[in-house]
Amino acid sequence: MNDRIESYLKEKILPDLENSRGGFDKYHTLEVVDWIKQIINHNPQLKLDKPVLIIAAYAHDWGYAGVFKDSEVIDNDKIESAKKLHMEVGAEKIKKLLKDNIFSFLTNKQKERCIHLVAVHDKKYEIEDTDEIILMEADMLSTLDIDTTKPVIDAESNKAVMDSILNIRLPKFKTDFSRNEAKKLIQRREEYFKNLKS
């Protein structure tokens, strides 16, 4: 995976995410890519397919583009109702993009895996393969992180998000790196929402 490929992914995907959830999806996507790289670097023993995971990270929320109005405060019900659709749309978008010649370095199996990861990344009860969980870890670390991108959900919805992370997603984490980072991010997120009430 080189800078040329990443520049191409940014050029094709990020403009669609500029206004998605008030710009949240653009910054969230870049954070997920960064977290994926960190997880891979801290876990060489997992022998993860770095190009596949990085491409999937760029495309994982591409399907949210156009779903929400700019600056809309989004409650958890709206996000949950859009989850299935955004995975389907995102998978179709990355399937089309992977036909571009720049991705000829990938095997058909790798391309299929990219599409699969986008298509299942939010199926929190179903994901179980290592690469599915690693993408989920990166996605959740970015979701928890309030330092770079402020949450676009209300405090009540945050409770539902945190319940899902703590009780369903976090127990599935495979890497100590992600578990340790999550602990720090959870503490800062709790403080952030506590201060919003004050």
Image: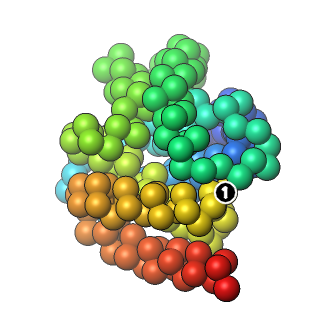
Task: Tell me the residue at 21%/41% (across/down).
Answer: 128
Relative horizontal placement of residue 171, taking residue 53 as reference (left or right) = left
* Render colour scheme: rainbow
In the displayed structure, 161 sits above or below 124; it is below
Q: Picture coordinates of residue 192 (x, y %)?
A: 60, 78
The local crowd at label 1, few if under 14, some if 14 to 19, many if 20 or more residues have their Cα within 10 Å, is some
* 48 or 140, nearer to the observer: 140
* Number of disc labels: 1
Residue 153 visible in rendering: yes
* Kind of residue at badge 1: Val
Q: Picture coordinates of residue 143 (x, y %)?
A: 51, 58
Examine the image and state in which quarter residue 67 appears: top right
> In the picture, which quadrant includes the C terminus?
bottom right
In the displayed structure, 161 sits above or below 6; it is below
* 171 or 142, nearer to the observer: 171
Relative horizontal placement of residue 73, taking residue 183 as reference (left or right) = right
In the displayed structure, 96 sits above or below 153; it is above
* 73 or 187, nearer to the observer: 73
Task: Tell me the residue at 22%/40% (across/down).
Answer: 129
In the displayed structure, 147 sits above or below 198; it is above
Task: Tell me the residue at 36%/26% (across/down).
Answer: 116
Task: Tell me the residue at 41%/28% (across/down).
Answer: 119
Identify the residue position indicated by label 1 in the image: 152
Tag 1 secondary structure: loop
Residue 48 visible in rendering: no
Q: Picture coordinates of residue 140 (x, y %)?
A: 43, 57
